[in-house]
Amino acid sequence: MSDKKTIEAPAIPQERMKELLLFQENAGLHFNDISILDNAFIHSSYANECRGSGIKDNERLEFLGDSVLSIVVSQWLYRNLEGDEGECTRVRSAVVSEDSLSIVAKKLELDRYLIIGRGEEMTGGRFKKAILADCTEAVFAAIFLDQGFDVVSDFILRNLMPIMQDVIDYRFKRDYKTLLQEYVQKRYKKVPTYTLVKSTGPEHNQMFYYTVSFHGKTFGPEGGHNKKDAEQNVAKLAWTQVAH
């Protein structure tokens, strides 16, 4: 028999409990075990500052929530979208993206309930898209574990349906520069390089053309009426080719 001691998570303080109950009420939820919800809001930066205290971050919940989200959206698309596999994949990819989930996070005001480390707080971590999107997935997992698939499915669809409809109707504008940077950083540990190759037309109606390069490959050029649009367009070209 192992004599290794198990460190239990500390009890939820009264003030924190009030915050969680407020979130629960505003979100239209009711947890049997509210500690699961609390865990969904604990960022790794805070857990790392509290090593040895029994506080666990939300990364395992995030992992589960990613899968729960995917199956809920995939099931809805299978049942409701008249389109081939490619169209379903296009919609799902946008709906489960960081851009989409951060919108849901802001709607649910998840930043109010996040528990993050001091360093992360000082650099604006509470409002970072990636952290908010990860927390959203963790909340989905917490609902799934505590309430089951039907409840989490209803919650996800209720909050994502406006975005889903915009994506289906091609009204949801994605930030392809961010998507491409996330992909390149994760895969190659570097960032893409954008290069202005030419500009054409009179000053009041110029077109700018950019390429983007990473890992020995160059994509483009793609144009836009300003530099920001041109970079977005060439990022979309590159991301579409490499991430699908």
Image: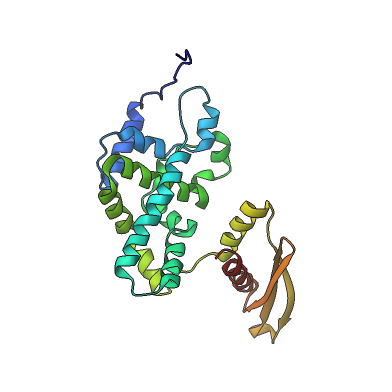
62, above or below 190, in the image: above
Residue most toward the bottom?
202
Q: Position of residue 219 (x, y in %)?
A: 68, 71
Q: In the shown orientation, is residue 124 left or right of residue 78?
A: right
Q: How is the image coloured?
A: rainbow
Residue at (27% x, 38% y) in the render: 31
Residue at (57% x, 69% y) in the render: 240
Residue at (57% x, 63% y) in the render: 243
Q: In the shown orientation, is residue 17 left or right of residue 102?
A: left
User: Is there any visible trace of residue 232 in the rendered image?
Assistant: yes
User: Is there any visible trace of residue 128 in the rendered image?
Assistant: no
Residue at (44% x, 19% y) in the render: 6
**Which quarter shows the C terminus?**
bottom right
Q: Position of residue 23 (x, y in %)?
A: 32, 42
The number of discs equals 0
Residue most toward the front?
1
| Res. 100 image quadrant | bottom left
| Res. 195 image quadrant | bottom right
Q: Position of residue 74 (x, y in %)?
A: 37, 61
Compare residues 161 and 108 and report the one nearer the observer: 161
Q: Position of residue 45 (x, y in %)?
A: 54, 36
58, above or below 12, in the image: below
**Which quarter shows the N terminus?**
top left
